[in-house]
Amino acid sequence: MSPLKPPASQRLGQFFGAWGLALLVSAAGAQAQAPTPVTASAASSAATASAPGAAAVFGGTALDGQPFTLRPDDGRVRVLMFWRTDCAVCLSKMPELRANAQGWRQQPFELVLVNTDPRRDDAQAYDRLRRELNAGHGPLRSAWLGDVRLPAAWLARGRLPLMLVIDRQGRVVQRHEGRVPAELWDEVADLLP
């Protein structure tokens, strides 16, 4: 078994646990893991540096195969969440993220999930499940780190989940690593018109 991929029973438990269904527990008794560190190699493989003072442009190909570009001049507030499918803390946040995205559906707000799994296939499998179970729930975009371009500073070393709050001018105004505080949603609400 590869050290990068947890046993199938544990992965299924994480998938279903993330969507608010009963958490499946593997025969080995899977335990919640500490937040996963963001590796420099993952960041350097997908990150591009932006010129000083330049507006940050983030884009690439979403997991549904659609190309996208998120421009800072479109007036949207965004929350970017960098996460992995083997990060229990990340998965536990998914229902909260979807609920808030749904609540701000009529606002200039977008939630962007950036999966940092080593294998794109793992990110795609999770995203297919998410789309099947939660079609149309909130302004949400999902991508794999290897398929996106983003400023290198956005993905400096840290723990997962890594949440970035980006204002309507495209500036990162808050950064949260590890467990996400409830105040994050107050920060987002303060940025919305």
Image (spheres, helix red, strand yellow):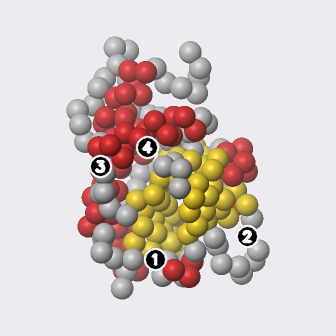
Quadrant in which the C terminus is drawn: bottom left
Give the image location of residue 130, x and y in percent.
36, 44
In front of the other: label 1 or label 3? 3
Q: Kindly identify which numbered label has been placed on residue 50.
A: 2
Identify the element where label 4 is drawn: helix
Label 4 neighbour load within 10 Å: few <14, some 14-19, many 20+: many
Q: Earlier in the sequence, mark 1 or mark 2?
A: 2
Identify the element where label 2 is drawn: loop
Left or right of residue 51, residue 30 in this image: left
Q: Earlier in the sequence, mark 4 or mark 2?
A: 2
Q: Earlier in the sequence, mark 1 or mark 3?
A: 1
Badges 1 and 3: C-beta atoms under 8 Å apart? no
Residue assigned mark 4: 127
Q: Kindly identify which numbered label has been placed on residue 137.
A: none
Location of residue 150 (image quadrant): bottom right
Residue assigned mark 1: 76
In front of the other: label 1 or label 2? 1
Label 1 neighbour load within 10 Å: few <14, some 14-19, many 20+: many
Identify the element where label 1 is drawn: loop
Q: Kindly identify which numbered label has been placed on residue 134.
A: 3
Q: Which amino acid, mark 4?
A: Asp
Label 3 neighbour load within 10 Å: few <14, some 14-19, many 20+: few
Q: Which amino acid, mark 2?
A: Ser
- Distance from label 3 to label 4 (Cα)? 10 Å
- Distance from label 4 to label 2 (Cα)? 29 Å
